[in-house]
Image (cartoon, helix red, strand yellow):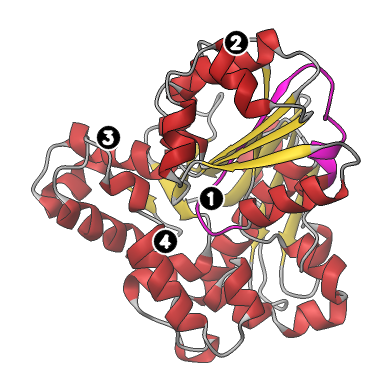
Amino acid sequence: MITRKIEGLIKNRLFQGKTLLIFGPRQVGKTTLLNEILRTTNVQGIYLNADLPIIREGLSNAGFEQIGATIGTNRLVVIDEAQRIKNIGLTLKIMHDNFPEVQVLATGSSAFELANDINEPLTGRKIEFKMYPVSWAELVENTGYLQALDQLENRMIYGMYPDVINQKGNEEEILTELNTSYLYKDLLSYSGIRKPQILEKLLKALALQLGNEVSLNELGRMLEIDKATVENYLDLLEKAFVIFRLQPFSRNLRNEITSSRKIYFYDNGIRNAIIQNYNVLNLRNDTGALWENFLISERMKKNQYERRIVSNYFWRTHAQQEIDYVEESNGQLQAFEFKWNPKAKTKFPLPFKNEYSPSKSEVIHRENFNTFL
C-alpha cells in the first residue's frame, strides 16, 4: 500500500476541536485512508459507509438522540461518502456541538454536493483537506527515486490512480472503468446535467485542447450550447475533480492576455482515456501537453499537501510571448517553462522579467523535474 501524505496531515489535526473533511474524486484511496487512520489511531472508532442505505437513512435529518445512539462510546467517527446523506451539514453540526469529545472525519467524492450542504452549518467548525490520485512525491517515497523514474513515461500516459499504479498490465481496462462508471457518477446524478452526451463532447474537446487557451464562445459554438451553459458545465467538472483552470496573470502590461483560460485534467490517465489514446510517447504529437499537464497537476498536489497558500497562473501577450506557469506566494512570483526535452532552448520573455522581477525563472525538463515536485 502506498503511504499517503495526507494521512499525516489529518492525524496532526485529530482531536483539536474541528470536524475534518476530505474532498476528492472517487477511487483515489479515501476509504483505504480512513481505515488506516482508524487502525493506527489509539482510540475506539467506528466506520460508517453512507453508500449503505441503513447508514444513509440513519444519519439523514437525524436528531440528538439518534446521533448519540449511532456514536455510542466511540471517540472517532468516520463517515465515508458523506455527500449521500441528506442534510449532512446539520448532522455534522449536531455531532460537533453536542459531542465535543468525539472527532468526526467525513469524506465526500463530489465537492459541489458536500460543500454546498455543509458550508453554512459548519462555519468555523471544520478543516478541509483535498485528496488526489497518488502524487509523484508519494510514489518516490514508496518505491525509491530510480524505480519511480523508470515509471515516468507510463505515469504520463496512464496517470496516478492507485489501481492503475498497482495493477500493471490492466491500466487501460481500469481507466475505461473509471472514465465510464466512477468519475462522472456524481455529476450525472446532479440535476444540472440534463444532456450527458454534451458533457462527453465537452470533455473530449477539452482533452484535445490540452495545454492551449480555451474560448468559451468557441466551445459553445462547437457543442451548440450557449456560453453560460459551457461555464456551468466547466464549473461542475471542476467541483467534481475532473478538470481545473488556470487564469492568465496580468498586472500592468497593456498587451497581456486577460480573458482566456487554460484547462488541465487532474490526471493524465483520465485525459487519455477520454480520447482513447494510450500510445507511447514517441508515437504521440501531444507529449509536450502531457508533460505540462503532469507537472502542473503534480505541483498542485505538492502545494496542497504542504499546505502552501499559492495562486497559479499562466502568462501570455497578444504578441505570443508566453510562460507556461506562474506561481505567486507571499508576494513573490516564480516563473516556469516546461520542456520534455532537456536540450530544448528557452528564453523567458524580457517584458515579464523587467516588469515583475520574478524571484525564480526556471525551465523544468525530465532531468530536473524532481526538485519541482
Q: Secondary structure at mark 1?
A: strand
Q: Is residue 18 part of the magenta span, yes or no?
A: yes
Nearest to N terminus: mark 4 or mark 2:
2
**Which residue bears the numbered disc 3?**
232
The amino acid marked with disc number 4 is Leu
The residue mark sitting in front, 4 or 1, is 4
Verify whether residue 113 appears in magenta.
no
Q: Quadrant of residue 272?
A: bottom left
| Magenta span of residues | 8-28
Mark closest to the chain's N terminus, 1 or 2: 2
- x 41%, y 42%: residue: 53
Which residue type does callout 3 highlight? Asn
- Tags 4 and 3 touching, CB below 8 Å: no
Name the residue furthest left. Answer: 224
Residue at 88 percent of width and 75 percent of height = 144
Q: Earlier in the sequence, mark 4 or mark 3?
A: 4
Element at label 4: loop
**Residue 318 in view (yes/no):** no
Labels 1, 3: front one: 3
Q: How far apart are the alpha carbons under marks 2 and 3?
A: 26 Å
Q: Mark 2 or mark 3: name the one nearer the start of the chain.
A: 2
Say which residue label 4 marks: 210
Q: Which residue is mark 2?
A: 123
Q: Residue at x 83, y 29 (%)?
A: 13
| Picture residue at 76% right of the left edge, 22% below the top | 102
Q: How much space separates mark 1 and mark 2, taking CA atoms?
A: 40 Å
Task: Identify the residue position indicated by label 1 in the image.
Answer: 322
